[in-house]
Image (cartoon, coloured by chain):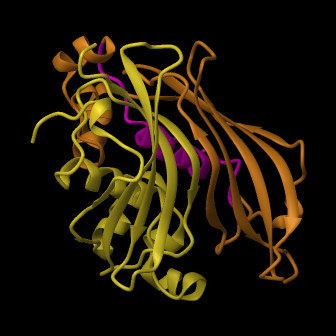
Chain colours: A orange, B yellow
Amino acid sequence: MDHQYLEDFHPGQVFESAPLTVSAAEIIAFARQYDAQPMHTDPEAAQAITGGLIASGWHTAALTMNRLTTAGFYNPAPGALGLGCESLKWPRPVRPGDALRLRLEVLNVRPSATRPAYGVVTNRFTTLNQHNDIVQEMISSVMIARRHA
Amino acid sequence: MDHQYLEDFHPGQVFESAPLTVSAAEIIAFARQYDAQPMHTDPEAAQAITGGLIASGWHTAALTMNRLTTAGFYNPAPGALGLGCESLKWPRPVRPGDALRLRLEVLNVRPSATRPAYGVVTNRFTTLNQHNDIVQEMISSVMIARRHA
């Protein structure tokens, strides 16, 4: 897939990924390393806390990023830099066996105030499960190179 | 360490973690799985893009979470649930060898509007490197159980 530049993004564009099924083993492995709380690491303890194992929100965020870079619809030119999130919400938990997919909407495209060879693209990333419940909603901005910089 | 409940948190409290040194191998391993872009996975390619390898912002976020749960100053009672972030910024990159530490400030403590046995604590998480540069700043809210629920 060709690299994408600032000029390739327009407000209103929508990209959708293929689904990705999340396993209990992956949920536990991520959490042991990065978010070691019993609702994420111990299926038995999680039963009493959250009605069963749920994924760390940071795992959902990382999978969402991974979806982006591997799903084949997002391949910005090297140098693209995430600037952070204006909001990041986990309205519902991710459970083992859930099939997640990502819907990316381009909200805004503007020149960079500080780096003339770049612009800033603001996107809404909505991560949905197989029931179309929203498990993560994130609005975030990324600095992307102009094509003729 | 004893579990913490809503009553243990007060606006103005500050917690600081011990430092954690991040290696190139860890930066690459995380990025291969969750954010496979050359500036995070390939030290040679990263030289031209970002002056050397930099960590995925999601890696910094995950390490910040891990710091919290293992640093010994944050141990909420089971059932504490992160609700998301009001903002999450990566003003500077994390590079191999950086020693990160976390400063957590409690900004606000309020009852939950929907779950009487819980309250919502809003915190500012500032992740700093060994030069005291801010590499991540996050404001986020977590639902925490009351002691006598």
> Residue B133, percent across and down?
45, 80
Q: Residue at x 56, y 82 (%)?
A: B50
Relative to residue B131, is residue A43 depicted above or below? above
In the displayed structure, B95 sits above or below A56; it is below
Q: Is residue A137 above or below residue B130?
A: above
From the image, which quarter does the N terminus of chain A lie in?
Answer: bottom right
The residue lying at 78 percent from left, 59 percent from top is A121
Q: How many marks?
A: 0
Residue B16 visible to an observer of this rendering: yes
The image shows residue A46 at horizontal and vertical percentages of: 24, 19
Q: Which residues are magenta?
A: A52-76
Image coordinates of residue B61 in percent, x first then y, are 43, 55
The quarter of the displayed image where residue A81 is located:
bottom right
Is residue A42 on the magenta stretch?
no
What residue do we see at 29% from left, 48% from top? A34
Q: Percent from the top left, x then y, of residue A55?
A: 37, 30
Residue A60 colored magenta? yes
Q: Nearer the viewer, residue B76 or B34?
A: B76
Residue B19 left/right relative to B1: right
Q: Is residue B31 visible?
A: no
| Front residue of this view, candidates B23 and B2 | B2
Image quadrant where one finds the C terminus of chain A: bottom right
- The reply, left or right, for residue B106 in relation to residue B9 is right
